[in-house]
């Protein structure tokens, strides 16, 4: 054998050794390492690309009788790689960054939906500022031509108890805790009953339920829409449209925030920052604000997802402007600015009201801080620096002086203690920090001194006092959770509903059933025995058996 032949064979052997080593590295990444799901994906992609390149080079350098077949295999591999972007497009990513592909020439689902039958749709342009004349900077009020809300907000559908309500994101208290609903545990003898299933437009909004209406946000072609459906039939009662479209390959298309219902008003925040207040009974727009323009703010990369908080006649939103325009409150009836405070950029979490240190506070997890505001003036009462990554999960009140925050992307959870000084100033400080519960965009819940949440897609029980993890089990993906009575209801990322016993002793799954086939990031809603769930393609209502009705 010539020297060159020897060198060539040695190089080919080395490449095959590198390929074998690459597969070992992939096995270590996926099976052994403790990295988060998205970290594993980001590490594995370049390794797989290098493996493919090495395989092509190795096949092309094979000599002898196998040369022709080896080069044919390499050509097929190259052709397949080149054909992928021609025949398919990247539709999106899962919570762990796995690609979701679609046939390139297939239309987007939301562009194929028929017009809403029977809905009084009103297509309106997105205003930069509908009511800037509402109140001058000197505080003087000016005349406004704002339509009054209907005097009769809505008549509940026949057979629908008027008290059934899930009026905002994560329920009445915005904590994900629904204490007065008790589901049966046996879903074999008492299987959830499908009442209706309908196609809906794109987006990650959930439903708000009140007085027989179920209201959500959807993307339908070039229109960002607020749609009210009859709770028991799924038929549209009214809709409101704005000529807006938000597209994101990575984060998904359409609006993300859940509407908030309060009396005669429905408050919604669109993906680009359009704050609408609509009439509950008709969907007629009463006023709008572009909160990014109004507060000289930049929209978050993945779209606005903070659901409006309505408190004491004010609509409170995370605008993210500097110079005191981070958290902003508008009068719910007129849209006039009431107050603003803070200077941090907007994150993806929603504001929530908590009683802390004996007083109500509006708490918000921003882009780089966890902060508490005075609900009457908007003044920042305290601010704790946070990691500057996508912060999505809602903070949790643990005690009168303790707040828990959790973040994904390898960061984890942090317990913050608030201390009031003699002068009334509040000082925050971390009690503990742990990577054992990394809530990427799920919303953990507190029950009996323990926090239950999805740690990069795996359910975790964590002691809130110490941050120690009691157990980690159940791969549900990046879904959502609600504490319904004494059971944890989990919507999985791939469209299943699971009941789990919330106990620190061990992971105990009680029941499950499948609703959707595909990515499901939307938060569920439950009002009495009615469970309403949706994805970016479908919505479905199930009648559940309550414990007083079954075993």
Image (cartoon, rainbow, N blue to C red):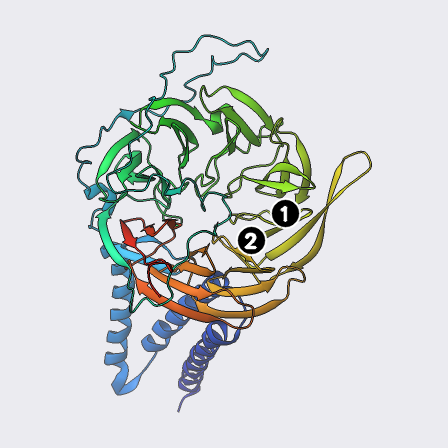
Q: Residue at x 35, y 61 (%)?
A: 497
Of 508 and 382, the residue lying toward us? 508
- Disc number for residue 407: 2
Figure quadrant of the N terminus: bottom left
List x then y, in percent, for residue 257: 42, 40
Q: Residue at x 26, y 55 (%)?
A: 102
Of 462 and 341, the residue lying toward us? 462
Of 55 and 454, the residue lying toward us? 454
478 relative position to 447: left or right: left
538 relative position to 145: left or right: left
Would residue 188 be seen by someone viewing this image from the given angle?
yes
List x then y, in percent, for residue 382: 69, 38
Figure quadrant of the C terminus: bottom left
Question: Crowding near pointer 2: few (<14 within 10 Å), some, many (20+)?
Answer: many
Q: Are marks 1 and 2 in contact (CB under 8 Å)?
A: yes
List x then y, in percent, for residue 370: 62, 43
Would residue 295 be seen by someone viewing this image from the given angle?
no
* Residue at the disc numbered 1: 386
Q: Residue at x 20, y 36 (%)?
A: 116
């Amino acid at each position: 054998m010539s020297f060159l032949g020897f060198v060539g064979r040695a190089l080919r052997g080395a490449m095959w050794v590198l390929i074998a080593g690459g597969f070992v590295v992939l096995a270590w990444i996926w099976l052994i390492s403790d990295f988060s799901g998205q970290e594993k994906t980001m590490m594995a992609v370049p390794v797989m690309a290098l493996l493919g390149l090495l395989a092509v080079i190795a096949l092309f350098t094979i000599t002898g009788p196998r040369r022709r077949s080896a080069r044919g295999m390499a050509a097929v591999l190259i052709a397949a790689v080149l054909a992928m972007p021609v025949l398919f497009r990247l539709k999106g990513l899962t919570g762990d960054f796995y690609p979701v592909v679609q046939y390139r020439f297939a239309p987007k689902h939301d562009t194929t939906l028929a017009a809403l039958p029977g809905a009084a749709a009103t297509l309106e342009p997105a205003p930069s500022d509908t009511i800037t004349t509402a109140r001058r900077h000197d505080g003087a009020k000016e005349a406004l031509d704002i339509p009054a809300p209907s005097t009769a907000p809505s008549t509940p559908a026949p057979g629908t108890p008027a008290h059934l309500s899930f009026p905002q994101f994560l329920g009445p208290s915005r904590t994900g805790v629904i204490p007065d609903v008790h589901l049966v545990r046996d879903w074999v003898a008492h299987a959830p009953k499908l009442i209706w299933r309908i196609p809906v437009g794109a987006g990650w909004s959930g439903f708000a339920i009140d007085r027989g209406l179920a209201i959500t946000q959807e993307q339908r072609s070039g229109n960002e829409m607020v749609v009210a459906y009859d709770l028991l039939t799924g038929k549209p009662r009214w809709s409101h449209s704005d000529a807006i479209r938000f597209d994101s390959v990575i984060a998904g298309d359409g609006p993300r925030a859940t509407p908030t219902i309060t009396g005669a008003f429905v408050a919604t925040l669109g993906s680009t920052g359009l704050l609408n207040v609509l009439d509950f009974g008709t969907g007629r727009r009463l006023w709008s604000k572009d909160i990014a323009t109004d507060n000289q703010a930049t929209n978050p990369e993945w779209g606005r997802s903070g659901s409006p908080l309505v408190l004491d006649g004010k609509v409170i939103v995370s605008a993210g402007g500097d110079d005191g325009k981070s958290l902003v409150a508008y009068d719910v009836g007129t849209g006039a600015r009431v107050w603003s405070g803070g200077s941090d950029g907007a994150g993806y979490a929603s504001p929530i009201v908590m009683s802390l240190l004996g007083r109500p506070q509006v708490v918000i997890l921003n882009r780089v801080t966890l902060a508490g505001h005075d609900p009457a003036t908007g003044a920042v009462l305290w601010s704790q620096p946070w990691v500057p990554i996508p912060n999505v999960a809602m903070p949790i009140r643990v005690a009168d002086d303790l707040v828990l925050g959790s973040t994904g992307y390898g960061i984890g959870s942090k317990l913050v203690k608030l201390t009031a000084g003699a002068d009334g100033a509040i000082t925050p400080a971390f009690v503990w920090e742990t990577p054992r519960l990394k809530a990427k965009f799920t919303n953990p819940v507190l029950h009996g001194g323990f926090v239950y949440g999805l740690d990069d897609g795996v359910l975790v029980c964590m002691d809130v006092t110490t941050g120690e993890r009691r157990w980690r089990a159940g791969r549900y993906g990046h879904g959502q959770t609600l504490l319904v009575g004494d059971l944890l209801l989990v919507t999985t990322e791939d469209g299943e509903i699971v009941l789990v016993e919330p106990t620190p002793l061990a992971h105990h799954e009680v029941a499950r059933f499948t609703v959707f086939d595909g990515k499901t990031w939307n938060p569920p809603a439950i009002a009495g025995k009615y469970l309403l769930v949706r994805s970016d393609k479908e919505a479905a209502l199930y009648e559940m058996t309550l414990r007083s009705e079954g075993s």
